Image: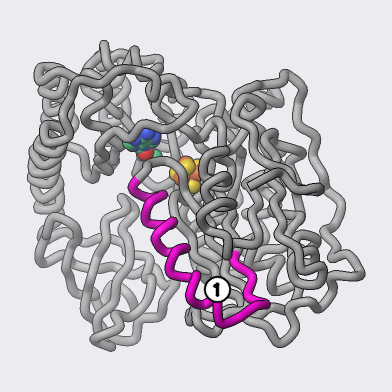
């Protein structure tokens, strides 16, 4: 499909570039342009979110904007006047799933001329995906990217009132925009962005292109948000960034993430988590701060990606496996009850059997509490996608199966240590099937299903663990302790 006047299409080459200018911070209050006000009155929106927590948080902003426009949420896609797919580009199979879903909406679009079908998020930042959407998925009439959520009112106006297909994807990040509306999906747990984008450029990863350069929020803006959340009754916050350790480096904020973490702890909010940490710039100060404050949870997601130093080098990870082990040991020595989870990619181009065995070795060494394991997926525009790959898919699949069996065994072994112990659980809510069964998470991020009475979601309660499984712990509420 030819470029139409007014369209802004993504451009990979532009997205690859980095400027050295600091991003500006836009603090003006968000206002809905006069002509857009009330355009959602009497209309329903259906919003689907894929991918990481950054996308979850973006969806909360989208929901906030849509509700300011007076749209009403629905979980029934057939009832929706606006369908919005907030997508993830990190692996091809996730993309295929989304495209399949979008394909299903064709029927709905045929019966409803005024139906708006929108695609946003990381897939919308990709040239080839947008081109596929424009040529093969013609029923999609709204495409926008990760850098211009705030433009949603005007974009919807063009589609709904102007009856035109609207494509607006900025390849370069803009200002850091404060004060966007937000409809938080959780009542007790909240996401807090501390920075956007990524400058690490791991050779397999598309995120630096879809999310732009690293831009930090100001420390006071973050702390104000946390204090407000605390006042509103939130008990847990998760500080979000593609690599939180780099927090503040772009703005020269003294003390960086360690300082932000300590200041956040001083707000007194019950539970603080953070994700994701890159092993390369995980400082000793950070370990010290996590060890010092009781309200910083002893749980670290520390993606290793591979157990082989040569592969790590080609991945552009900036650490050797020895350095990873040293960091891991330092964390465990200072925070002995710390749970550590990881991400691992198998079948990176030309990964040999021996190199894969090194990945099995690091699993044996760290005995991770949890692992997210993936088969390498080539992403257009990344350096790794140019590499020849001599590893057949069956080999990659076998490696993945072996790896999963191995880390699962350790996860069970770790969970077994909880049997007979008493843990603090932040209650998510009662189970759907059984009113006297509840679930929630420990400080170490273990899912606990437990029985008890008189428990409310948002409570932090003591639970005695009676049984451990690979994925969860089971227990009973301790009545006396929770009086
Ligand atoms: N192929 C497979 N897995 C990937 N990840 C990122 N890019 C790719 C890719 N091209 C994984 C990494 C990362 C997690 C979010 O997704 O393990 O940490
Ligand atoms: Fe997916 Fe990465 Fe985008 Fe998150 S930032 S939605 S993981 S591609």
Q: Look at the picture and state if 95 lies above or below 83.
A: above
Q: In the structure shown, which secondary structural element does the residue marked by tag 1 occupy?
A: strand
Residue for point 37% across, 70% down: 427
| Residue 53 relative to residue 38: left or right | left
Who's the residue at 52% across and 48% down the image?
A: 132
Q: For this rendering, which residue is in front, 399 or 264?
A: 399
On the image, the x and y values in percent for residue 103 come to 44, 64
- The image quarter containing residue 199 is top right
The quarter of the picture where the C terminus appears is bottom left
The spot of residue 77 in percent (x, y) is 49, 78
Look at mark 1 in the image and give the residue it sits on.
Answer: 46
Residue 68's image quarter? bottom right
- In the image, is residue 103 part of the stretch drawn in magenta? yes
Asked if 228 appears above or below 83 in the picture, the reply is above
The answer to whether residue 166 is above or below residue 371 is below
Horizontal side of residue 25 vs 378, given as left or right: right
Magenta stretch?
A: 93-117
Q: Residue furthest front?
A: 2
- Residue 154 included in the magenta stretch of the image: no
Circle 1 Cα neighbour tier, 10 Å, few/some/many (<14 / 14–19 / ≥20): many
């Amino acid at each position: 499909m030819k470029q139409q006047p007014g369209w802004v299409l993504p451009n990979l080459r532009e997205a690859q570039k980095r400027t050295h200018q600091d991003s500006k911070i836009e603090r003006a209050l968000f206002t809905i342009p006069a002509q857009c006000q009330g355009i959602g009155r009497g209309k329903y929106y259906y919003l689907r979110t894929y991918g990481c927590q950054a996308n979850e948080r973006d969806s909360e902003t989208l929901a906030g904007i849509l509700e300011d426009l007076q749209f009403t949420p629905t979980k029934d896609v057939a009832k929706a006047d606006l369908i919005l797919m907030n997508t993830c580009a990190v692996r091809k199979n996730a993309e295929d799933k989304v495209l399949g879903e979008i394909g299903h909406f064709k029927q709905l679009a045929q019966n409803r001329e005024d139906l708006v079908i929108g695609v946003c998020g990381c897939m919308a930042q990709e040239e080839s995906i947008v081109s596929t959407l424009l040529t093969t998925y013609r029923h999609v009439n709204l495409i926008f990217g990760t850098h211009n959520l705030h433009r949603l009112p005007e974009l919807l106006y063009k589609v709904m009132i102007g009856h035109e297909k609207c494509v607006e994807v900025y390849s370069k990040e803009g200002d850091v925009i404060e004060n966007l509306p937000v409809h938080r999906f959780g009542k007790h747990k909240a996401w807090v962005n501390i920075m956007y984008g990524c400058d690490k450029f791991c050779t397999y990863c598309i995120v630096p292109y879809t999310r732009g350069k690293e831009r930090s929020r100001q420390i006071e803006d973050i702390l104000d948000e946390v204090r407000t959340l605390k006042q509103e009754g939130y008990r847990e916050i998760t500080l979000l960034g593609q690599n939180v350790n780099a927090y503040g480096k772009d703005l020269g904020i003294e003390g960086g993430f360690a300082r932000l973490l300590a200041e956040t702890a001083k707000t007194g909010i019950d539970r603080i988590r953070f994700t994701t940490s890159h092993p390369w710039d995980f400082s000793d100060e950070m370990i010290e701060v996590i060890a010092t404050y009781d309200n910083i949870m002893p749980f670290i997601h520390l993606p290793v990606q591979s157990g082989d130093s040569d592969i790590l080098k080609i991945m552009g990870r900036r650490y050797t496996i020895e350095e990873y082990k040293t960091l891991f040991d330092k964390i465990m020595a200072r925070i002995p009850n710390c749970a550590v989870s990881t991400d691992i990619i198998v079948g990176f181009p030309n990964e040999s059997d021996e190199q894969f065995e090194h990945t099995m070795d690091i699993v044996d060494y760290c005995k991770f509490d949890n692992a997210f394991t993936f088969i390498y997926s080539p992403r257009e525009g990344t350096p790794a996608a140019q590499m020849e790959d001599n590893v057949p898919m069956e080999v990659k699949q076998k490696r993945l199966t072996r790896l999963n069996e191995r880390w699962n065994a350790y996860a069970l072994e770790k969970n077994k240590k909880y049997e007979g112990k008493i843990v603090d659980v932040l209650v998510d809510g009662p189970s759907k099937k059984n009113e006297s069964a509840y679930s929630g998470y420990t400080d170490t991020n273990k899912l606990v299903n437990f029985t008890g009475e008189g428990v409310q979601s948002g409570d932090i309660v003591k639970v005695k663990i009676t049984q451990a499984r690979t994925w969860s712990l089971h227990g009973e509420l301790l009545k006396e302790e929770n009086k």
